[in-house]
Image: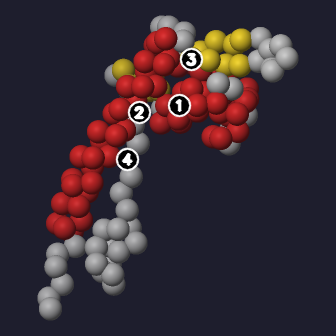
Amino acid sequence: MAGDRGSKYYDIFLRHQLEMISGDEIIISEEGFRLILAIEKYQSITSAANELGISYRKAWGMVRDIENNLGFCLAGKKRGGKSGGRTILTAEGMALASAYRDLLVELDQSDKEIIRKFFRRINPLREQ
């Protein structure tokens, strides 16, 4: 919440998105990062795609685009057997997911104070 109850910014929040870029080209979008984390979580591209509300085909397309942009493999398929197949992150994919999660924690900690300052600047104290 950005201000005291009744202030004009009370129910307004700030959110930013992260993208990995090279020049003007997006290497990994916010949705791409979320997909990587979901693949890590579920070890299933189908489940990861379902969590993001995208198709299986789009999810694999995103993975391939990210891999092409980065120049290394992020995920691979393990053919199923009795328990079905899996999609697992490579060592590089796991390192990227871990670093991104750590970055989100660090940004969340610093963002809270920065955002508080922003809203104090645009929402001065009401006269008593």
Q: How crowded is mark 3: few (under 14 residues within 10 Å), some or many (20 or more)?
A: many
Q: Which mark is residue 101?
A: 2
Q: Name the residue nearer the viewer: 23 or 40.
A: 40
Question: Counting residues from the N terminus, which is met first, the one under dot 3 or under dot 1?
Answer: 1
The dot on residue 89 is: 3
In the displayed structure image, the side of residue 121 where residue 95 appears, left or right: right
Between disc 4 and disc 1, the foreground one is 1
**Do labels 3 and 2 touch, CB within 8 Å?**
no
Q: Report which residue position mark 1 lands on.
A: 37
Name above or below for residue 11 compared with residue 22: below
Furthest residue toward top: 72
Secondary element type, mark 2: helix
Tell me: 15 left or right of 53: left
Q: Residue 81 location, x and y as percent? A: 83, 13
Residue type at numbered disc 3: Leu
Q: Which mark is first along the chain, 4 or 2?
A: 4
